[in-house]
Image (cartoon, helix red, strand yellow):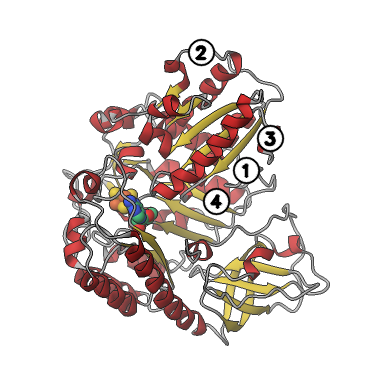
């Protein structure tokens, strides 16, 4: 039996939205067992880092914290230190040898076993190494069918669906207020094997959740007051569930292994599966829109250019509460580099997709990811990426310097031959180019009234320049500024009216007149003549730093 009581946990999350959602599930699971959470790592009985492995820098951030806890432990502090997530899975037990202060490791595919690991670590310090780790290794890929059928993680996702009023995701302390924006996973893992990426190794084979479970989870969240849901998957448009293949003991459909790109025709539409009924991503979006009418916004990330059919674009066009926002990483504008990355499309095909999307959804807002300094990238290749940015006119781009990752094909076969200073320069050049494009895209909104989902009071820190790129965002003294996002994911700030309270607006969608714009932010004025009544006051929390802002931090 797990130890229950008043043990306190500090949980810090690094990395992507999947990690944020995982942390939320961990939080719910541990809270149900009687653990409480603290925002102070020094005051906690258990310190958990939910780690990211996608770039070396992300790993180093965690490892420096691990080092600090090692010092505390050598000075006599009694604290259980656990690493969960992708770094734990990627490095495995080697981490325990390198950092003896780590008490437990738990991969992202084994999170249902975390309470048992914590329990073991709290009970005894001499617990066997085998009882301190829960890692998938490459088991999940070798036995993907079994892994999907006996998917304990599904229980974790489902148990969360029963608690829509739990604390918000991410962060270390939890806000305690009802959630207004939530993530819902539709697939786990990835079958793509881009040559630079660790995700297929750390999160395992692609597994697709049953549509009924997803719709039910969305409905419960919306019933609990959630206004906006973001569906999560590494390549969401690959979602494809074949019905009638496998049922659980209770007669419910169970998660199943994803077919990946092989199930899609070149033009994007999925193939039928031996005459069986399938639910495609477009079907899933349509179902959620139809069956959860109280949900005001539905989003999804991340898209994969190839296999993105017009059926999805048409559902987006026809369903007004589906946000016209696409996050479609391009990674490079050079066909040679795209081939080396194993991306499976050319820059021309990427542009065709963008044109197709804009034909059907003229007001669609598009964000991307780009890697600079991939092995063998020349100035010519880089120039092609810069040209593509100009063509696409992304509203923002997440720009990364290539970071070689052990275990990936690129690590094994392609020497990291672009010097660090060249990577840095290309990174800064693209950031500057994108800042100009983003400024123009944002400026188009000036004079319009936009619907803003209010996330919270804008962060004071955001008024400073991020890196060397000016945000042009100074919070006037003595006034409270609220921050939120448009349906197209444009960050919007506006002053709270004199007679207003933040909780009257937080978690609501309000009309804002856009007065001016910078590269990252729209500045506006609340249109409503009167403030809406505070029906269900939510705990006020600071808006999380926008991903756009973090990307502009120049290292
Ligand atoms: N180096 C740099 N960037 C990477 N990404 C993934 N792996 C690496 C790597 N090894 C970026 C890609 C991906 C985003 C989540 O992270 O752009 O889309
Ligand atoms: Fe990584 Fe490629 Fe999968 Fe994205 S699609 S998670 S970049 S392997």
Circle 1 residue:
172
User: Which comes before the other along the chain, label 1 or label 4?
Assistant: 1
Q: Position of residue 170 (x, y in %)?
A: 57, 47
Label 2 environment density (alpha carbons within 10 Å; few <14, some 14–19, many ≥20): some
Circle 2 residue:
127
Q: CA distance from mark 3 to mark 4?
A: 29 Å
User: Where residue 182 is drawn, which disc sits there?
Assistant: 4
Which element is circle 1 on?
loop
Q: Position of residue 162 (x, y in %)?
A: 57, 37
Circle 3 residue:
42
Give the residue drawn at x 43%, y 57%: 300
- Residue 390: which quarter of the image? bottom left
Quadrant holding the N terminus: top right
Give the residue drawn at x 58%, y 47%: 169
Residues under numbered marks 2 and 4 in contact, where contact means CB atoms less than 8 Å apart: no
Q: How many marks?
A: 4
């Amino acid at each position: 039996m797990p130890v229950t009581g008043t043990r306190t946990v500090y949980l810090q999350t690094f990395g992507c939205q999947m990690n944020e959602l995982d942390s939320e599930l961990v939080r719910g699971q541990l809270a149900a067992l009687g653990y409480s959470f603290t925002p102070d790592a020094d005051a906690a009985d258990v310190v958990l880092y939910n780690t990211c492995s996608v770039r070396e820098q992300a790993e180093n951030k965690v490892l420096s914290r691990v080092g600090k806890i090692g010092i505390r432990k050598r000075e006599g502090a009694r604290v259980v230190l656990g690493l969960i997530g992708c770094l734990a899975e990627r490095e495995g037990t080697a981490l325990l040898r390198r950092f003896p202060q780590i008490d437990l490791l738990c991969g992202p595919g084994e999170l249902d076993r975390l309470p048992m690991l914590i329990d073991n670590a709290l009970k005894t310090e001499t617990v066997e190494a085998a009882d301190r780790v829960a890692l998938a290794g490459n088991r999940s890929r070798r036995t993907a069918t079994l892994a999907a059928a006996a998917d304990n993680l599904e229980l974790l996702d489902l148990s969360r669906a029963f608690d829509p009023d739990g604390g918000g995701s991410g962060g270390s302390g939890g806000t305690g207020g009802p959630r207004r924006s939530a993530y819902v996973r539709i697939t786990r893992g990835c079958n793509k094997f881009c040559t630079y990426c660790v995700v297929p190794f750390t999160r395992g084979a692609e597994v697709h959740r049953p549509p009924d479970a997803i719709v039910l989870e969305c409905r419960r969240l919306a019933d609990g007051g959630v206004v906006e849901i973001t569906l999560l998957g590494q390549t969401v448009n690959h979602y494809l569930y074949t019905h009638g293949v496998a049922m659980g003991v209770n007669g419910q459909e169970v998660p199943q292994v994803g077919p990946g790109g092989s199930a899609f025709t070149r033009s994007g539409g999925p193939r039928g599966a031996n005459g069986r009924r399938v639910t495609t991503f477009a079907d899933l979006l349509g179902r959620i829109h139809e069956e959860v009418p109280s949900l005001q916004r539905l989003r999804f990330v991340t898209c994969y250019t190839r296999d993105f059919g017009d059926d999805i674009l048409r559902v987006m066009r026809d369903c007004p509460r589906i946000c016209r926002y696409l996050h479609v990483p391009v990674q490079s504008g050079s066909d040679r580099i795209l081939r080396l990355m194993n991306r499976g499309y050319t820059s021309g095909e990427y542009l065709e997709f963008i044109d197709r999307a804009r034909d059907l959804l003229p007001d669609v807002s598009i964000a991307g990811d780009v890697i600079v300094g991939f092995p063998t990238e020349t100035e010519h290749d880089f120039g092609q990426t810069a040209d593509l940015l100009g063509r696409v006119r992304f509203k923002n781009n997440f720009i990364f310097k290539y970071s070689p990752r052990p275990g990936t094909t690129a690590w094994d076969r392609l020497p990291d031959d672009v010097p660090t200073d060249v990577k840095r320069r290309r990174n800064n050049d693209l950031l500057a180019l994108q800042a100009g494009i983003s400024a123009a895209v944002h400026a188009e909104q000036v004079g319009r009234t936009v619907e803003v989902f209010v996330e919270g009071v804008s962060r004071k820190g955001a008024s400073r320049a991020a890196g060397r790129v000016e945000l042009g965002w100074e919070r006037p003294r003595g006034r409270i500024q609220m921050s939120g996002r448009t349906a197209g994911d444009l960050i919007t700030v506006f002053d709270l009216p004199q007679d207003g309270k933040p909780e009257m607006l937080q978690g609501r969608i309000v009309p804002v007149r856009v007065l001016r714009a910078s590269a990252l932010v729209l500045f506006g004025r609340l249109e409503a003549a009167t403030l809406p009544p505070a029906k269900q006051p939510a705990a006020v929390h600071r808006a999380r730093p926008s991903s756009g802002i973090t990307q502009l931090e120049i290292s």
